Image (cartoon, rainbow, N blue to C red):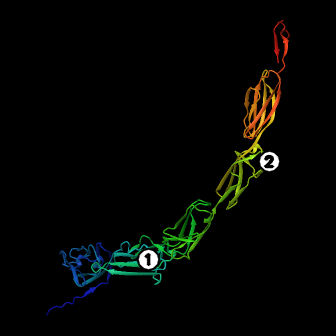
Amino acid sequence: MHDCFLLCILVIGLETLTSKYGDTIEIPCNKGQLKETDVTLVKWKYEGGNILVKQLDQNATISPDVNYKNRVSIKKDFSLVITQVTMTDQRTFTCMVVGKDDILEYPVQVTIYKVPSQPQITNLTTAMAVGKPTMLAQCRTEGVSPAANITWFKNKTPLMTDRAAIKINTNVDVDKETRLSTTTSTLEYTAVKEDIDAKFTCQVQHIRSANMDSSPLVFTVNYPTEKVDLQVVSQGPFKEGDNVTLKCTADGNPPPSSYSFYINGEKKTVDSNIYTLTNITRENTGDYKCSLVDNEDIVASVPITVEYLDVVLSTTGKIVKKLGESLEVTVDIKASGAAQTSWKKGNAKLNSLSKFDKLTYSDSGMYECVVSMAGLKKTRTFELVVEGPPAIKNLIKERGEGMAKVLKCVAEGSPKPTVQWSVNGTSAESAYEHGKVTYSITIVPNGNLTVSCTASNVLGSDIKSIDVSARKCNFFPLSYLTSEPSCITRFFC
């Protein structure tokens, strides 16, 4: 008769263990509480294969399993050590313990995780048009377990698919060999004008790592022109002969490359937003416009005023008038604004100048009329010459040195009179001012005589005479002047 034994296998509750991809993991057998004296044999296995067997007082026998033969070992407390864990190690490992009386199994569920890579931006566009759906970019993270989530943000506000302006398409692909996942998210967005300078980011989210954001993405927002503006670049006020530059700008993006300018009602289309008017005249005063080439309803205008100043003097050049005549000087001013008029004679300022009722020699001279306004100044000049025949205004005699007498003949006239004396002597003359000159002669008369002064110019002559007598001398004996007698007689005049 044979003895019969019934052997039971008792399975202990499932234990869980988590490890990072690529690390070394230590899987405990019965939480590391086994005693070597209580164990006859320990086997580590998984569903579908054995890993190793350890018998009492013997070395461990490692299975030729290609997945583990070079990566496993067993510790003294029968814990299984696996190096460089991968996703294939994400399974249930069982530690089977054969004791003296029973067989126990301790299953351990191993979970492997791998953190995601930094978000990668691909298929990036550069611009988006208002009102038009545009695929902006694709955000990708790879080599992850479990799969990562991707969320898009605009100005730090999360975007959600609304099937209208926002469409987000997210795919998760798992590599058959590595069993690692790749998450790809594509953002399609319909821009509005307010999206100028908006910052878009994608964020990778994973349970085993902190959130990771991409660099901000800023897109050019294109939108049609709704308004144009016309500016006068040149600094006014403008006067005839100036150049004036106009600049047309549009609020669209990108701005138009060509514009239509309306110059004196004539349409001129140029491949620029600049138009220059050269050598402008008063006829250029008016409203100027610019518009889009393909939409003349979008238009802007600006007024331009060309300042002008016309000055006509009734008297110009050299004017010769007779003494005592009248002269009226008029200034005809045509200007685009209020003008100021000032007069000068030589370097002296005059309050006004309108009419000479009776011309004198002092009225002769160079006259200058200055008319100014709004950056404009016009100068007109004329020379007035008052002519008349000579007139001797005075003929006088004065005592000179010793027996000499000085005769002075004051003459007026224009052109400058010349003087001829009826006697010889030492002559001199003064400066000729305001039609007057003084001629003088120094003589020593021997007796009574009449001296004539004749003043003449091309218009005539004048003569005046004056009686001049020798100075009387008194004779005194020298004894009259001194106490000593003398027969010498001196005379004094």
Numbered tag placed on residue 152 in the rendering:
1
Residue 362 visible in this rendered orientation of the protein: yes
The quarter in which the C terminus is drawn is top right
Q: Amino acid at mark 2?
A: Lys
In this view, 446 is above or below 241: above
Mark 2 element type = loop
Numbered tag placed on residue 27 in the rendering:
none
Q: Is residue 244 left or right of residue 155?
A: right
Q: Please identify, in this view, whether the residue under mark 1 or under mark 2 is nearer the observer.
A: 2
Residue at position x 79%, y 47% in the image:
358
Percent coordinates x, y for residue 79 in the rendering: 26, 75
Q: Earlier in the sequence, mark 1 or mark 2?
A: 1
Mark 1 element type = strand
Q: Amino acid at mark 1?
A: Trp
Classify residue 313 by image quadrant. Answer: bottom right
Q: Which residue is mark 2?
A: 358
